[in-house]
Amino acid sequence: MMMCSRLRPSLPRLSPLRLMGTGASKTVAVKQPDLRSASLAFEDPSAFRVKSFGELLRALGIFRLCSFPLLVNNSGKLMSVARTLLGRRGFSLLLRPTIYAQFVAGENESEISQSMEKLSMLGLRPMLAVPIEEDLGESTGEKRYDDNMEAMLECVQISHSKAWSKDPMMQLKITALISPELCVKLTTLMAEQPYDLNLLVRAMDGESINFPGLDDREVAHFLCGLQRLNKIAEASVNKVRVLVDAEYTYMNPALSLVTMAMMKKFNKDGTWIWNTYQCYLKESRSLLLEALQLSNNEGFFLGVKLVRGAYMDKERKLAEKEGRQDPIHQCWEDTNDSYNSLLDVMLEAISQKPECYRIIVATHNEESVRQTAKRMEELGIDNDGGSVCFGQLLGMCDHVSLTLAKEGYAVYKSVPYGSVDDTLPYLVRRAQENRTVLQGIRKERDLLRKELYRRLSLRRGS
């Protein structure tokens, strides 16, 4: 069994880890940079020549609507009214060729396959996402969580069985399998007494564990949740990489605890389970450094999904309501600095031990993408060596995704799938969480418009 040894340079001294664990040393020569240029331009409308005329018109129309804050902020209410007025069938007929077709792969395996094959032909890789998640007050019982597990096992099977990409990924939200209320309670307990990862690993193996601070009902639910996650991880190992999403700060420590336990069990000979780090949080740097140190000590591989974050407004309002310090960086520039700093930490680690660390640079920010490409070249990291890849949402930022793919980088598109009813809450949340991005996609609209005008002029000329 392959084990990860410690990095040669010592990591910064940290406060005691919230997660407990205990690791060997080996140096690896850093590959010298090649002569390829890492500069990337995202100004060429020809990236959109792969799109049909109808797709261009649809994207332009939707992005234009998304530029109005009033529409995005009230999208949930507006869609609820439209569904009431049009009925379920009429509402589906309205959404399917428009918003649904822009951001969702399809409802059944045939529709999903068509969408994924198209991405594959463009040099893009799908990262399927089951649009299931819960927040406080939305818990629905063990039967629903078991059904969610079956949906995620099906996602593993679909991702693996099709030849869409050589290294398939999928996304997972732990709150679809363990109640948010329990995650919040675990977070509170962890602040007083850290949980040993070995306890969770033993529970995943089916051992009956008594977790301190939980009552009998909570213990039973936690054991069921851990075993659900264990089944998904067992099905995905050596087949599909599972990227666990971060959510709200009031439950994230519990989500990371569970994710790290999964890594300890399943990431001994490959990076199959990944965790997400939200760079808009002031504590994001310490969290990532703790994870690096823990993976070093325990000898497991670490997969990192690096995002800026999407729950800013709710986090700030909650902090103000509870009279505690705002967990979010004060301004956009601070968040950018945080993102680029953590990106550099991971790229340095990868350059020293590429077999032990992986990162997906999940961003629509062109400057962060350019910085990543530049640092990859400086550190001698291959474009498509597997250690570094990029990620964007389906239906957005295609001028960045397609340009990266054309230059030989590994690029994934986050791809939700399901019925209109199943994906609607997911789409509304994503729209509201990403409204800053949606309202700032003027450049993509301009490039789409240029490509549309080019085709119209060709038609007039012929």
Image (cartoon, grey):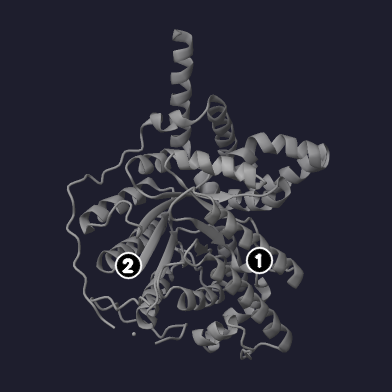
Where does the image place residue 42, in percent across and percent down from the top left? 36, 38
Image quadrant where one finds the N terminus: bottom left
Three-letter residue code for mark 2: Glu
Three-letter residue code for mark 1: Met
Residue at 37% across, 39% down: 403
The residue identified by callout 2 is 355
Where does the image place residue 190, in percent across and percent down from the top left? 54, 84
- Report which quarter residue 156 is drawn in: bottom right
Residue at 58% across, 44% down: 113
Q: Is residue 299 above or below residue 363?
A: below
Image quadrant where one finds the C terminus: top left
Q: Dots 2 and 1: beta carbons under 8 Å?
A: no
For marks 2 and 1 on the same chain, the one whose residue lies earlier in the sequence: 1
Binning the other alpha carbons within 10 Å of mark 1 as few (below 14), some (14 to 19) or many (20 upward) gives some
Q: Is residue 27 above or below residue 42?
A: below
Residue at 63% across, 80% down: 185
Q: Is residue 5 above or below residue 140?
A: below
The residue identified by callout 1 is 149
Callout 1: helix, strand or loop? helix
Where does the image place residue 62, in percent across and percent down from the top left? 59, 35
Binning the other alpha carbons within 10 Å of mark 2 as few (below 14), some (14 to 19) or many (20 upward) gives some
Q: Is residue 53 left or right of residue 293?
A: right
